[in-house]
Amino acid sequence: MNPNLNLLQPYPFQRLRDLFKGVTPNAAFKPINLSIGEPKHDTPQLIKDALVNNLGGLANYPTTIGSIELRTTISDWISRRYQIPALNPEKAILPVTGSREALFAFAQVIIDHKKPDPIVISPNPFYQIYEGAAFLAGATPYFLNTLPHQDANYNHVMDFSSVPADVLARTQLVYICSPGNPSGKVMSLEQWRTVFNLSDQYGFVIAADECYSEIYFDEASPPLGALQAAHLLGRDYKNLIVFSSLSKRSNVPGMRSGFVAGDEKIIESYTLYRTYHGCAMNPAVQAASVAAWNDEAHVIENRRLYAAKFKDVTPLLSNVLEVAVPDAAFYLWAKIKDANISDTEFAVKLYRDLNITVLPGSYLAREAHGVNPGKNFIRMALVASYEECVEAAKRISAHF
């Protein structure tokens, strides 16, 4: 067996199940689950129709590179969304079966064991796939804590000035999530400039996880993307790969559809890897993906639904939690005001007394540099209906 498997820690939701063992939720309340970031809004009919109308594609083996129609559609969407010149759909874009497996597999392509002691930098708290990808690629994760910062520009954002030069010299891959999970923070242009300059200096590859990029609250100010930042700074896309997905944007987590885009040389190597890896996208899913990327009306409506929840939920929680509407994404990263109760105790109390499930913040982070940056936070995914989210907030406000 691969000994690196022993380095993997239980997934946060397994830890949550273990935490709740033997705890009986209050049956007087209807259960409300805000723990997992699984979209619950309706899947748009146009996507369902495209999927059903193209089931004939099941008779064909899909290609790793996907159809030229899909790659061109993605290129056009990137250009429209980020106001940058269209990428070459044949060389700079690759459809993938959701961003999760793509983010994991990517480390297998990038890590070079001819160089000693490779490091993968990850935000902390983080999406646990980054850590697992690093370990199973034979690298060591270096966790960059994202905490409240004396410089407000770096609140809950990766501050690379704290990373020692000897660590950067061994770094081969950096995972960046913007908008962030769990904080919802968006990287600024100057922050991207810093990362790009360090990549130039040390040669590491940037994996920009942008799966939450389309959940934001000001239609006039969509979150800055990594490709867009590079373009605005007059750069090419060397050592930069962006990962995106339809799951959150279009409420199709079960469809497993996304893309990677950026550095053409890296895309070429990643395509070779995936040819052997065997994760080509189903032809019917490809057709449905074309329909999804070509339509923005359903995405605007999706954002409207989330905005309504955040607007009405955050004031209700303010007496119990330090909470504010995030820059983007559908999470509330909320600090518990009562210093006498831990995040795990708070989660148990919500489950036992109010039949509400949230995720303790410490489960999303690792102890690093003397602190667990998720400690005393909880993550609430506002993916349930408006009525359920407001009801959960009212229960919490009344109980404490």
Image (tube, rainbow, N blue to C red):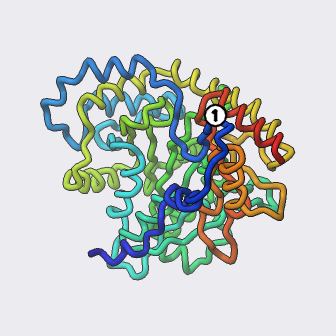
Q: From the top left corner, tell me how far across and down residue 80 is, in percent.
A: 50, 28
**Residue 127 drawn at (x, y percent):** 52, 56
Residue 311 visible? The answer is yes
Residue 287 in percent (x, y) is at 29, 26
Task: Locate residue 25, reporting x and y percent.
Answer: 63, 47
385 relative to 63, above or below: above
Can you identify the residue that label 1 sits on? 216
Helix, strand or loop status at disc 1: loop
Find residue 156 and report its image quarter. Answer: bottom right
Left or right: residue 111 versus residue 228 is left
> Which residue is outermost to the right?
319
Left or right, 276 with respect to 237, comes to left
Residue 318 vertical position relative to residue 277 in the rendered view, above or below: above
Eyeballing the image, is 346 above or below 312? below
- Does residue 330 appear anywhere in the picture? no
Residue at left 39%, top 33%?
75
Residue density around tag 1, few if under 14, some if 14–19, many if 20 or more, within 10 Å? many
Residue at left offset 50%, top offset 51%: 208
Q: Residue at x 51, y 49 (%)?
A: 235
Residue occupying image coordinates x 33% and y 78%: 3
Q: Quadrant of the N terminus?
A: bottom left
Give, as a three-letter code, the residue at label 1: Tyr
**Does 99 sit left or right of 181 as displayed?**
left
